[in-house]
Amino acid sequence: MRAKGIRAGSAAVAGASGGAPLADSAHRTGLATPMTVVRDAALPGRKVVKSAADLAINGAPPMFPEPLHVGRPNIGDHRRFLQRASEILDRGWLSNNGPVAQEFEQRIATFLGAKHCVAMCNGTIALEIATRALELKGEVIVPSYTFIATAHALQWQEITPIFADIDPATHNLDPAAAWRMITPRTTGIIGVHLWGRACPIKELQAMAKEHGLRLMFDASHGFGCSKDGLMLGNFGECEVFSFHATKFFNTFEGGAVVTNNDVLAEKMRLMRNFGFSGYDNVIYPGTNGKMSEISAAMGLTNLEDLDDFVAINRRNYQNYREAISTVPGLSVLEYDESERNNYQYVVMEVAPYFPVSRDQIVDALHAENILVRRYFWPGCHNMEPYRSYYPHAGLMLPNTNRVAERVVVLPTGSTLHADAIRGITSVLGVLASGKA
Ligand SMILES: Cc1ncc(COP(=O)(O)O)c(C=O)c1O
């Protein structure tokens, strides 16, 4: 694996502390000496957790001096990014479908083997534009077990998200449950490829065809992943990606709709630019969904290091799996090795017989500064405004409720050292003894 050029983000999100900063001169000129992988700080002297007394929840010092986040940015080669940034400044073309954004779109479309990539300012706006371009209205079926943006993108346009239950084995939409939610008001289905694992595309396609519904996918987790050898981005009428800073492939903020439909692509290109067709002619309701040049520059740079990001994530996933497989009551969700995966999420499930609860595990790890997440607890249907609109939705969502109460997502990414994984899993081992 090529390590050079990958380092911890010096401007991590959500208050995360950064890795070692570049020398000042490197920031100014981009002429840094070759960079090396920067791993999480303070490996030497990390405490060893062997018994309950070693746990921070019991008064011991935390394992990590700084918070270890689930999603810290993967950042490709700084010099190549700074070179592109410098060219953007020289050109003075910062947004409005500039040459870097156009190159980015072409590279993404080629990488995915799809006809069109319409780059956007973020995944949420991309969802809104895609659903608007598909003329969805009335009710649209979505899983509740997803990030809230899937539902909000609909609600924001006064389209009603109808929550269907998931298959507890895959965490993805259960086609039979989706079928039960179809009414005369249903106009579409948004399947979500949760954790980057494809949802049941064929079944949803058949259902959409039979009932005359439009089908699109929220592929925010699935960049670089495939289904039956075909890259996500090629299914349904279109697929939406998020390139948010915490995603394994980021453009600072960003997103895209990928489609093989020429007419739809053209419509979305106009809609992301206020609906303008030419200088003074507006032909659609539109919004400002454009990707900036600097975001596209980040995307092109990170695309060049994508294989490294995947390799690191895969190694982390395998290390976690190996360690956790020895802990009764804990399991790590598997990726199908016959497909392309980005291994961006390490998803641990806690069985009901595990001696401590999922939330106690989270508390114990947080005390160690290991900021694991309870994605996507408590489910969209338990958040506003949906909780107030449909207070009994949970009755139709037993698997969503069950899975949301069992899942813990563990830290991964290019800033995580194998030694940190050993530390994290040693805490789990002690919790499994039930003596914490
Ligand atoms: C499943 C899903 N959909 C939509 C989004 C929204 O993307 P963005 O944050 O780029 O707006 C996310 C982002 O986290 C997501 O995970």
Image (cartoon, grey):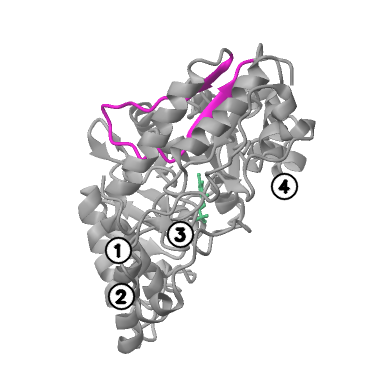
Residue occupying the point 31% across, 70% down: 79
In the rendered structure, which amino acid carries the disc numbered 3? Ile
- Mark 3–mark 1 Cα distance, whole angstroms, equals 23 Å
Q: What quarter of the picture does the C terminus occupy?
A: top right
Q: Of the two numbered discs 1 and 2 on the same chain, state the one appearing first in sequence.
A: 2
Mark linked to residue 129: 3
**Around disc 2, counting alpha carbons within 10 Å, would you say few (fewer than 14), some (14 to 19), or many (20 or more)?**
many
Q: Are marks 1 and 2 in contact (CB under 8 Å)?
A: yes
Q: Of the two numbered discs 2 and 4 on the same chain, state the one appearing first in sequence.
A: 2
Mark linked to residue 84: 2
Mark linked to residue 385: 4
Q: What quarter of the picture does the N terminus occupy?
A: top left
Label 3, secondary structure: give it.
helix
**Around disc 1, counting alpha carbons within 10 Å, would you say few (fewer than 14), some (14 to 19), or many (20 or more)?**
many
Residue topped by disc 1: 300
Query: Of the residues tagged 1 and 4, which is closer to the observer?
Result: 1
